[in-house]
Image (spheres, grey):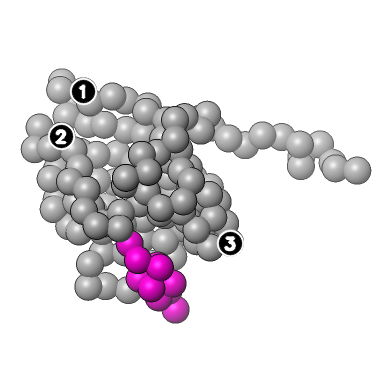
């Protein structure tokens, strides 16, 4: 029998809508928290990835901040090794840095994504992350 702590749902936000298949490999969901707000120049969303799911390579013209809230994930900037992400990690991504992020193979992964300086643009989607790239974590 499960104890009461095992039955408590620790989800902060609902999963939201399925992420666009053109920009994600595997299943992911996006819940918009703050839509494109011209007064604040910010977009915020909660993104949930199933194990092994990830987004394409992409850039943010105004930069981005990721705040990890659940699970274990990966983050990689072009030309650098994959970084392992855990709950409580914060990643600050400078404008126009080519990168991707997603779940590790064995864990769901959730982060809050904050796109900053949206007056410069929100996101420029690029090519898919190959399985070889994804599986290069050491």
Direction from residue 95 to residue 77 in the image, left or right: right
Residue at 37% in and 27% down: 33
Residue at 42% in and 61% down: 74
Direction from residue 2 to residue 98 in the image, left or right: left
Query: Which of marks 2 and 1 precedes in the sequence?
Result: 1
State the residue in front, 116 or 29. Answer: 29
Residue bearing mark 1: 37
- What's drawn in magenta, residue-wise? 129-138
Residue at the farthest right position: 1
Can you say which quadrant of the picture contains the C terminus? Answer: bottom left
Residue 23 is situated, as x and y percent measured from the top left of the image, at 31, 47
Can residue 90 be seen here?
no
Disc 3 to disc 2, how far (Cα)? 33 Å
Residue at 24% in and 57% down: 127
Query: Which of marks 3 and 1 precedes in the sequence?
Result: 1
Q: Which mark is residue 91?
A: none
Residue 38 is situated, as x and y percent measured from the top left of the image, at 15, 22
Disc 1 to disc 3, how far (Cα)? 35 Å
Residue bearing mark 2: 118
Residue bearing mark 3: 106
Direction from residue 107 to residue 66 in the image, left or right: left
Q: How crowded is the residue under tag 2: few (<14 C-alpha within 10 Å), some, or many (20+)? A: many
Query: Which of marks 2 and 3 precedes in the sequence?
Result: 3
Q: Residue 4, located in which quarter of the rendered image?
A: top right
In the image, which is nearer the foreground, mark 1 or mark 3? Answer: 3
Label 2's element?
Answer: helix
């Amino acid at each position: 029998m499960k104890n009461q702590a095992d039955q408590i749902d620790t989800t902060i936000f609902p999963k939201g809508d399925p992420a666009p298949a053109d920009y994600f490999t595997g299943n992911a969901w996006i819940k918009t928290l703050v839509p494109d707000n011209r007064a604040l120049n910010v977009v915020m969303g909660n993104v949930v990835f199933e194990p092994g799911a990830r987004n394409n390579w992409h850039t943010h013209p105004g930069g981005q901040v990721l705040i990890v809230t659940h699970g274990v994930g990966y983050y990689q900037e072009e030309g650098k090794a994959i970084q392992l992400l855990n709950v409580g990690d914060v990643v600050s991504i400078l404008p126009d840095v080519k990168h991707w992020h997603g779940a590790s193979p064995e864990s769901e992964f959730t982060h809050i994504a904050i796109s900053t300086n949206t007056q410069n643009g929100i996101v420029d989607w690029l090519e898919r992350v190959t399985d070889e790239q994804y599986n290069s974590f050491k």
